[in-house]
Image (spheres, rainbow, N blue to C red):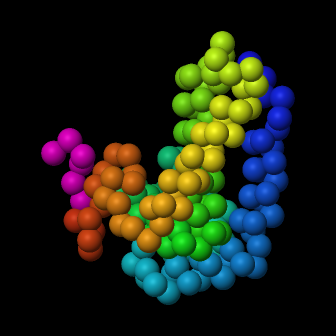
Amino acid sequence: MPIQNDLLGQLRREWRRLGRSTASCLALCQLKERHPDAGFGDLHDLCDVVDALDMKSRLSVIERAEILRILLEDAHDPLICRTLLQTLIPGIVSVCRQLKFGEGIISEPSEVLATALSFTNELLVKWAGESRQYSAPDYFVGPKGTNAPLDQ
């Protein structure tokens, strides 16, 4: 089912602009200063952070979970919050697809995606500043690197 309103295209264009901006580079520099032991190493901007959080990146699941935890703690910054949302978009689209974009319930499929993105953003804003141990799906990342799989 095609999405008539190209919301994803708009988000991609916006992210290309925001994620490589001077403000993005500055935000990452501040993250590096506050969290020198995190996996931000050779990253230059927040687009690089999103790329590093991809499952195909060189970072381990635990390193990615730690970065997600740090981003959530610093999500009072709208640019950091947008970075988190950007990392979640593929999963949100996947869930919407599984729900067939509300087929038979909602007349405009793009409304399902827009609502899901909006609710996710609201949740990120609400959780901003918190250290949520289950903010990453597969691992608990506790203080100072204490890690344990969720099923233990």
In the displayed structure image, the side of residue 80 where residue 123 appears, left or right = left
One can see residue 104 in this view = yes
Residue 151 in magenta stretch: yes
Q: Position of residue 152 (x, y in %)?
A: 15, 45
Q: Residue at left 39%, top 78%?
A: 37
Lateral position of residue 19 relative to residue 132, left or right: right
Q: Residue furthest top?
A: 104
Magenta stretch encompasses residue 82: no
Q: From the viewer's perspective, is residue 69 above or below residue 41?
A: above
Query: Quarter of the image containing the N terminus?
Result: top right
Q: Is residue 70 above or below residue 104?
A: below
Which residue does the image show at 62% across and 35% down from the upper left? 93
Q: Is residue 143 left or right of residue 132?
A: left
- The residue drawn where x is 81% and y is 48% is 10
Indicate the quadrant where residue 51 lies.
bottom right
Q: Residue extending furthest left?
A: 152
Percent x, y of residue 71: 49, 67
Which residue: 38% across, 46% down? 137
Q: What span is colored magenta in the figure?
A: 147-152
In the foreground, 144 or 111: 111
* Image coordinates for residue 104, horizontal then vertical, percent: 66, 12
Q: Nearer the viewer, residue 59 or 4?
A: 4
> Quadrant of residue 44 in the image?
bottom right
Note whether 12 is above or below 31 in the view shown. Answer: above
Say which of 58 and 128 sits in front.
128
